Amino acid sequence: MSSMKYKNKVKNTVFPLSDIKKFKIKKKEKIYLNVNISICIHCYDIKIFKELMFYIKNFFEFNWNNIQIIIHYIGYSQKEIEDIIELSFKDLKEINKLIKITDSFIFIKGENIGVDIGGFLKCLEKVKNEDDIIIKIHTKSDDLWRRSMMNIFSIDGIYTSIKLLEFKNIGMIGSLYNIEHFRKKYNPQFNINQYYIPMIQNICNQINFPFNDKNLIESYFVAGTIFICKRNLLNDIIKERNYLYNLCLDLRKSKWKSGKMKYTYEHALEIMFGYIPFQKKQYLIGLY
């Protein structure tokens, strides 16, 4: 269907804004969490990466069934990344725990393709079949925006997120302060954006995921794509990650202009990460 037909199809149909599910962060009660997790980090800015390690340390306040941290980095050496990790964990007194933490890191030297979305797709190559949880973090350049998303990575935020994901009808966790309705963010006059709907439909067709334009319009997503989710939500993304990676912009040839880039598959995938749980009725919860 052409983009003009999409616009004509929905311009007279205004769906109510969906209620965003929200939950207040609870105090940590347990140390052992019997789950397997992969934390995917895209590192474009090494100074911000140093800040992110403050939050990554919080994951080691728990005993996991298995934990791995996959770091996709651009423009730096692995030694520079490792030095920051070592410095971040230098206060640990237990040498055995330090060794275990060091062994938890996996490094991928990448290309500047697809900003954080491209980096995430590359990290997905290393997630394990037995993983229960996948976490997406990146060195987002806007300090206020990035830090407002980090409440889910406080010690209590991590604990609350993992406990919420035990429910069958909850699939993803983000910060309440950064969850946006697709319709509200991109279509303030209810003229559904004639670009993103066909782009997301194309993604759905290629990865064999159900496409429902009404659900897409009603869905909401984490603006900034920093979240915690069940691995099974991303099975189709993981399977077709190479195809999706090839849709991303090659930023070795052109520069990404923050806030000015539109109609990109990077933005379409940002929305897609919210549409998937909405379509599957495994809802995205905003923590506050």
Image (cartoon, helix red, strand yellow):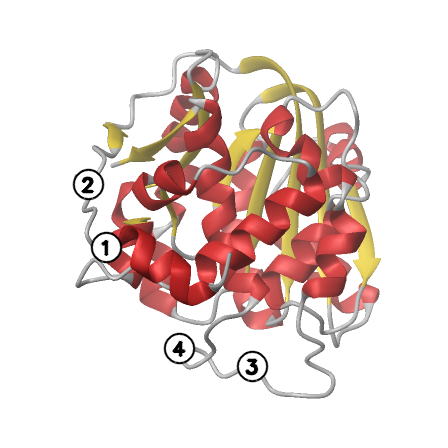
Local SS, label 4? loop
Q: Earlier in the sequence, mark 3 or mark 2?
A: 2
- Res. 119 mark: none
Relative side of 280 to 91, left or right: left
Q: Quadrant of the C terminus?
A: top left
Q: Which of marks 2 and 4 is nearer the N terminus?
A: 2
Local SS, label 2? loop
The residue wearing badge 4 is 259
Q: What residue type is labelled 4?
A: Gly
Relative side of 169 to 100, left or right: left
Give the Cα distance between marks 2 and 4.
24 Å
* Residue 138 place in picture, x, y as percent: 56, 57
Q: Which amino acid does label 2 sit on?
A: Leu
- Crowding near pointer 3: few (<14 within 10 Å), some, many (20+)? some
Q: Which of marks 1 and 3 is nearer the N terminus?
A: 1
Q: Which amino acid does label 3 sit on?
A: Trp
Give the Cα distance between marks 1 and 3.
24 Å
- Crowding near pointer 2: few (<14 within 10 Å), some, many (20+)? some
Depth order, front residue of 246/16: 16
The residue wearing badge 3 is 256
Q: In this view, does 3 lie above or below 40?
A: below
- Crowding near pointer 4: few (<14 within 10 Å), some, many (20+)? few
